[in-house]
Image (spheres, rainbow, N blue to C red):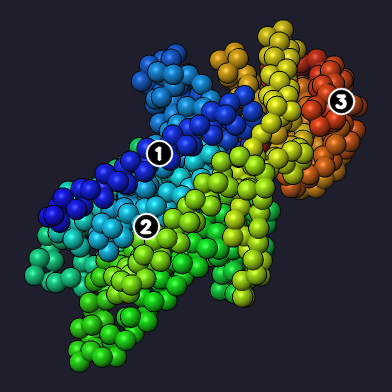
Amino acid sequence: MSRLDNNRRWLIAVALGCLVLAAFNAWWVAKYRHGFPLDVDENGYTMIGLNDWLGFENHGLHGWWEAVQQQTPNAPLLPAITSVVLVFSPGVLQGFGVLILIGALLTLATYGIGERLAGPRLGALAALAVATSQGTFIFTREYIFALPTAAFLSCAVYALLRSEAMRRRGWAIACGAAVGLMLLSRTMAVSFVPGIVVVAAILILVRGRDDLWPRLLNFGLAILAAFLVTATWYWRNLSPVWDYLTNFGYGNQAQYYGESDSTLSWARFKSVTDRMVQSDLLVPLAVLIFVGLVALAVIAVLRLRESDDKRGTLEGYLGADVLAVFLVAAAGFGALMTSQNGGNGFSYPIAMLLPPVAVVALRRFRMATIPVAVLVAAIAVLNVAAHSAVSEGAAKVRNVAVPLFGELPWVNGEEHAVSAMRVQVPGPLNHFDDQDKGWTDVDKELADLLAAESKAGRVQLTTFAMRNRVISTNSVGLASLLDNRVGLPLTQVIAEPTDSVANYRRQLTDPELGKPNALVTMSSEADDFEPIVTQKKVEAAAKPLGFRLVREIPLPDGRSARVWVKQPESAEPAPRHRNSKKTRGNS
């Protein structure tokens, strides 16, 4: 069998595996996400996609383009792609369908990288590890931006390898375009750009000087392609994105999303590694990757010691594809260490670059190929079982002691979008059940009430005092878009600079903040997002200002939401919205 036929056979096998996993994830999403609540960020991002779609419905392509441009500081790509699907089939689950397709793209890109580094058979093994990893299951079923970022980072790395150190112009431009799409997928992905640029420069300098100028030209075209793709959105939104990233990545808001350890410390290194193992890989796959990386390092050292031309050997290492991929991942890891904000899925894109690097060691230790393949297959089966929701027992978190790192999970079937709400809402950690459907009913009731008050002229702006994990400005705003195809003017009370009655009175009366004339509070702020807003203090600030309780809505967990309204005043300045989709600093 020719090499081309062998490559095609393994590519077909990987593609068929993608179809099987796509069907599995589609079944899970249809069964456990339809009619159930979304978490805070999912609500916000879904609402953005709906706004993009409504822009097209109301004003055509120009309306769609303007809607896409107005969602700062959240990256536009995933909601924009979702909005295109909504043109043909409106609904909430369509966004998950987009994620499932992007997961297949990530798997195929991983196969491409692995095939380049270690051949088609080991490339398929790396693709299996990525496609069935903890992170891929989680981020295929949670409507956030981690999966598209990982997919386009892997596409960029694959195109970089195929460019042959920027000798092949088409692949060089494709690399730049993929970098641009990665940046449009998630704003924090700027952390991964320096690694790609530096690695590309190293490959250009190390792999011959005869055609240096043509390759530098192609490098410039790659950078231009990245700039042009990125500029489609960042040109109008760079300033607010910069403010948001610096505030939530390195400013005052970062303190709520990670420990304040110094950048160059074991504690910061451990925190990034912990997140990568807990959310992206789990212990069994992480150990296999670690062993593969150590084996590669040992092989490299032994070859260097035995080499008569050590300088030439080192230059060969610098120009090797496998080191290029590893350096992109390592640079991204280092970038994540600079921020206190651990984020949700920040480490996932770089974690998915490691399996195709680790399998390269099997080219030297061929006898280990079958045992490792069996282990990867066993890990895949274990993860599929854990994320099938067949039983809570199969999904239960089971930890193992890891030297230097403490207790880390070796199996975990909890779904992020579910477990994030279980902090406040009791129930299974791996799926929603019928009792959870009541939360979407509350969203609809609040949306209908506020829409009616707004139509009657009694409410121009509503502010939410609670920072609840289920009911929020995002969930109610989404319910309004779904039911009425109109947005509600909503804003958010914050506990900064202090959690005090005086601070909340200022926020309810400051013209620069819009002077809301409707307020939603909760009977308890227990387990809300930090910084906690004390609900009774907000109510104490609101009552003397003329806010009156008009409805108390019982919640499925026994608490209640309270709607307060006062007579609208004369025309107010345009509100400066503070939307709760920022609460987790996830852009």
Measuring from the top left, give residue 379's x and y in whole percent. 49, 56
Q: CA distance from mark 2 to mark 1?
A: 17 Å
Q: Are the two marked residues, 3 and 2, in contact with CB atoms closer than 8 angstroms? A: no
Which residue is located at x 46 percent, y 70 percent? 290
Q: Which mark is residue 20?
A: 1
- The residue carrying mark 2 is 126
Secondary structure type for disc 3: helix
Which quadrant of the rendered structure holds the N terminus? bottom left
Which residue is located at x 67 percent, y 47 percent? 393
Number of marks in the image? Answer: 3
Measuring from the top left, give residue 91's x and y in whole percent. 51, 21
Q: CA distance from mark 1 to mark 3?
A: 59 Å
Which residue is located at x 36 percent, y 57 percent? 125
320 on left or right of 354: left
511 on left or right of 356: right
Measuring from the top left, give residue 557's x and y in whole percent. 81, 32
Q: CA distance from mark 3 to mark 2?
A: 62 Å
- The residue carrying mark 3 is 545
10 Å neighbourhood of mark 2: few (<14), some, or many (≥20)? many
290 on left or right of 563: left
